[in-house]
Amino acid sequence: MPGASAHPLEYARPSRRRWLGRRGVLLLLMAALIFIGWRYRKPVESRLGLMYWQGKCLTYARPPGSVVFEAYLDTAKLVPALAIDPDIRVRRDPVTGALDGQWRDPACLRQFEILLPPGVLPSGGSGTAFLHQRTSKSGNVRLVHISMDWVGPIDPASTFNWAVIKPATLFAAAQCMKSQDCNVFVGPCGADGLGFGQADPIDESHFTIVFGGAHGKRTGVIDCWLQDDDTLVFKTQWAVGSWQASIPTEMEGR
């Protein structure tokens, strides 16, 4: 264009003062983040630890054929067993104090319980019979825990202490939705005849606990279902020709 300058326009460079101001803001933001992280590090570490151990509990499983209690251990094998399996908790004879058996007591559950607020996981029971995630028909995801008390060799009833836990999230605490003690009739098999519960891979609300004589001799099975109201329904089914025909083939209870 006529009269236009042939020299290109020169844009002013950002002043040093503006550059220093931006850098100062970034430094302040970084300092604030470091302070917040340091200030709340313990609650964050605790919540992350709780989520980790909760995940272990939600996926916990024992191989089929595992039992809740193993009686009359060879004590010479006990120390190596404890070193290999962190889920073992020994039992002592209440009179003599001698080692006479071992319970299944998941280490992940112990760690999870330490990080939970008091009362979320009800106390009770000597050993764990089931620990896993179950989902009700309407989609409620829960951690189901069943513990049991010692059963004598001629006692037909096993006391189950069950709890249904709503899992914690990053922003919400875990909550015990329902818990209860109930007697389930399993015949005179003793705790060493009670198999560790197995989650049903098809029906996510269902799991089973096999019972029978010592060393896994099967005489029946306890079917359990998680309900939408956070209760558990138990149904005991007896094998043909098993102990005490006077016990109903099926028994329901909550």
Image: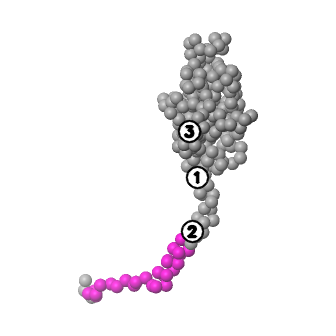
Crowd band around label 3 with a 10 angstrom C-alpha radius: few (<14), some (14–19), many (20+): few
| Residue behind mark 1 | 49
Q: Residue 137's quadrant in the figure?
A: top right
Return the residue at label 2: 34
Nearer to us of marks 1 and 2 is 1
Q: Position of residue 132 (x, y in %)?
A: 56, 37
Residue at image location 60% in from the left, 34% down from the top: 73
Q: Quadrant of residue 164?
A: top right
Residue that mark 3 sits on: 77
Seen at 70% across and 34% down, the residue is: 93
- Left or right, 182 with respect to 8, comes to right
Residue 167 visible within the image: no
Q: Earlier in the sequence, mark 1 or mark 2?
A: 2
Which corner quadrant holds the C terminus?
top right
Quadrant where the N terminus sits is bottom left
Q: In the rendered structure, does residue 208 fall within the stretch colored magenta?
A: no
**16 falls in the magenta region:** yes
Q: Describe the element under mark 1 as helix, strand or loop.
A: helix
- Please state if 12 lies on the left or on the right of 42 as rendered: left
Amino acid type at image mark 1: Gly
Q: Give the number of the mark in front: 1 or 3.
A: 3
Q: Amino acid at mark 2?
A: Ile
- Kindly identify the amino acid type of the residue bearing the numbered disc 3: Lys
Q: Is residue 174 left or right of residue 3?
A: right
